[in-house]
Image: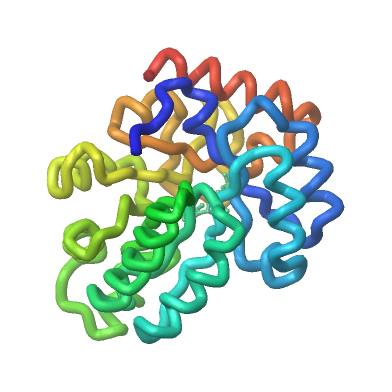
Amino acid sequence: MKLNADPKSRLVVALDVPEAASALRMAERLSGEVGMLKVGLELFCAEGPAFVRELQAFAPVFMDLKFHDIPTTVRRALEAVLTLDPRLINVHAQGGPQMMEAAAQAVRAHRAAGGRTQLLAVTVLTSLGREEWARLGHAEEPGAAALQLARLASDSGCDGVVCSAHEASAVRDACGADFMRLCPGIRPKGSATHDQARVVDPASALQMGANWLVVGRPITHAEDPRAAARAIVEEMKSGA
Ligand code: C5P
């Protein structure tokens, strides 16, 4: 499945809001200007599948639910979510190769039946610092572990990973150009970083090997979200 070269299709907006009404209002404002809308655990737990169906009237949806359980449970949960035919879903790579293989099997069956969903893996949560990672019993650095988990995700049949733009080219080199890199932590030039530590601007992120850029607050907190999304797409064009 090739990614549309149009920069707009590579822009994923994080709808980090607590309820459907504000998410749908934002989706309507952004309709036609962005490639995908990201629904996280907070919104999905509050509003459920019917809300996702409503949202899909405005743009394809990335269901950022980060499944992590025994293989059968993850496969069955994915089969339930796949009835919505989201554009992207994800699992934790730390669930292991068998869990990722079970997830990939469900996604492949869905695509064979005409679905469009692709499966991403989350490697190491960026909220886990070095110290906490070591306390979990890991000897290697989080960065090295993330790359190893990306390789495992690729070998297990996932379509890509969620990673920092700083890691995107290493992931591409390790797993191949067709293995997708979806990157959060993106900030337009000259905008507030909020709580993101190592931000990358849109054009640089594409040049560094990102396929999809996740942007939240610079768009959703803007006075004019539609104009903010357009401006980011313009920035992306200089890096595409
Ligand atoms: O508002 P902002 O652009 O920082 O939002 C980024 C989105 O990407 C949020 O939904 C956040 O949870 C998610 N994310 C992130 N950093 C990661 C992984 C996910 O910011 N390493």
228 above or below 154?
above
Where residue 35 sits, quadrant-wise, is top right
218 above or below 229?
below
- Residue 96 vs residue 217: left or right? left
What residue is drawn where x is 51% and y is 29%? Answer: 9
What residue is drawn where x is 47% and y is 21%? Answer: 6
How has the structure been colored for display? rainbow
Decide which of 122, 186 is in the foreground and name it.
122
- Residue 60 vs residue 74: left or right? right
- Residue 169 vs residue 31: left or right? left
Q: Where is residue 157 in the image (x, y as percent from the top left)?
A: 25, 60
Q: Which residue lies furthest to the right in this view?
A: 21
191 above or below 164?
above
Q: Where is residue 94 in the image (x, y as percent from the top left)?
A: 31, 74
- Residue 236 vs residue 232: left or right? left
Q: Position of residue 4 (x, y in %)?
A: 42, 27
Judge whether residue 83 can be spotted in this image.
yes
Decide which of 170, 63 is in the foreground and name it.
63
What residue is drawn where x is 45% and y is 15%? Answer: 237
Decide which of 190, 43 is in the foreground and name it.
43
Quarter of the image containing the N terminus?
top left
What residue is drawn where x is 38% and y is 19%? Answer: 239
Q: Where is residue 141 in the image (x, y as percent from the top left)?
A: 20, 66
Judge whether residue 131 can be spotted in this image.
no
195 above or below 35?
below
Q: Residue furthest front?
A: 113
Quarter of the image containing the C terminus?
top left
